[in-house]
Amino acid sequence: MQVEFHVISFLIVLSALFAYVNHKYIRLPGAIGLMFTGLVFSVALMIFSTISDTTLNKVKETVFKLNFSNLLLDIMLSFMLFAGAIHIKIDDLKEQKLPILLFSTLGVVIATFIVGVSSYYILRILEWQVSFIHCLLFGALIAPTDPIAVLGILKDAKVPKSLETKIAGESLFNDGIAVVVFLSILEISQHSDTFTWSDVTLLFIREAIGGAVLGIVLGYSAFWLIRSIDNYKVEILITLAVVMGGYSFAEIVHTSGPLAMVLAGIIIGNHGVKYGMSDLTEEYVNKFWELIDEILNAVLFVMIALHLLIIPFKIEYFTILPIILIISLMARYISILIPAQLTRIKQIKITHKTVLILTWAGLRGGISIALALSLKPGMDKDLWVAVTYFIVAFSILFQGLSIGKVAKKLVS
């Protein structure tokens, strides 16, 4: 436990230091600045290691102990999704429910298969012997998007509220759906001889539908408790219990914890706030979860930057990285374009400019790296981890920094 505490302390100290340096001197948008500062730190360590590799080895050892995959997927993700969902207004979601539903379900499946199939044939052309099912796993883990780094920038660019809601709503739900798709493909890859399509369907229903039902039950149970009292300290504690207890229970019964947290957060953030909380409680609850969100996102982006030190980049990867990056961008565009056309059935018109903004705003984040790190060595893990890290770094640093200008140009 002592070692774990020191590791977490190291991460918090670096996050605070990088946040200060970025705010004081670099002045990039929060998440992007943290990752940029962290990457500069990582590169500086690698350069310094040519003189003495003692410090680099100690930092590498600490990064290994962090266990990024478990820390994010088993702990941090529940807090981050709930914190994001509790600030989403249900009226905004209702107006954009069809696009958000299609982008976060059909869009994820389309992106998964386009990236997976394309990567398989491209790698075969380049004489890389990879399994088709492992390429699909990569497609599933690279499909979810993370809007944290761009939402603030888009607000400054004065994009329509409907567009903000599409981006935020899609990212909240597609994390959960992408994890379910990933787990389904993972089960097929591990039990290909005995796993049938009916098993896949049952797994998807249990994870997705079960997670949604659990989230609704958790949300309304917490709402009933919150409505019966007026004490902001106890009510904040109830929301913490929903996140920690609810996510743990979801893992025990094998349902989607991410989907449960999103729906519970939306219910508490709307019905709980409107009908169950006093103005004082609402203020404290919102500030508490806003602070949790900011801290965890700072830690997450620093963790992503530090993982540059242990990502297995090989010379032969550098011919593959830009090709698969382009494939992922094309897949993102198509996975937005097709659902956008389907919305016309309900007389909801999404312009081509909106499709382009949504494509470029589709940043990949920590969940993609965490899923890649969760792969077993026999699943071409080193390759997929390197490719995933490259795509995540590109999307955060280049797409994140340019999305404001792109949005302003397309919106004007």
Image (cartoon, grey):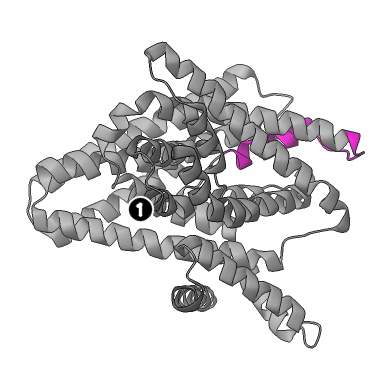
Q: Could you tell me residue 127's position as x and y percent? A: 92, 38
Q: Is residue 291 visible?
A: yes
Residue 297 falls in image quadrant: bottom left
Q: Please say if 61 is above or below 377.
A: below
Q: Is residue 46 left or right of residue 28?
A: right
Q: Please say if 33 is above or below 325.
A: below
Magenta stretch encompasses residue 137: yes
Q: Is residue 380 visible?
A: no
Residue at image position (72%, 61%) is: 311
Residue at image position (8%, 52%) is: 278
Quarter in which the C terminus is drawn: top left
The segment highlighted magenta reads 125-143
Name the dominant secondary structure of the magenta segment. Answer: helix
Outermost residue, right direction?
127
Magenta stretch encompasses residue 213: no
The residue that mark 1 highlights is 244
Outermost residue, bottom direction?
51
Q: Amino acid at mark 1?
A: Met
Q: Could you tell me residue 298's position as x and y percent? A: 46, 65
Q: Is residue 301 left or right of residue 382?
A: left
Residue at image position (68%, 47%) is: 375
Q: Could you tell me residue 398's position as x and y percent? A: 61, 54
Task: Using a 10 Å C-alpha cutoff, classify the residue at mark 1 as few (fewer than 14 neighbours), some (14 to 19) or many (20 or more).
Answer: some
Q: Could you tell me residue 244's position as x and y percent? A: 35, 53
Residue at image position (25%, 52%) is: 239
Q: Is residue 157 left or right of residue 310?
A: left
| 233 or 27: nearer the viewer | 27
Residue 287 falls in image quadrant: bottom left
Outermost residue, top direction?
345
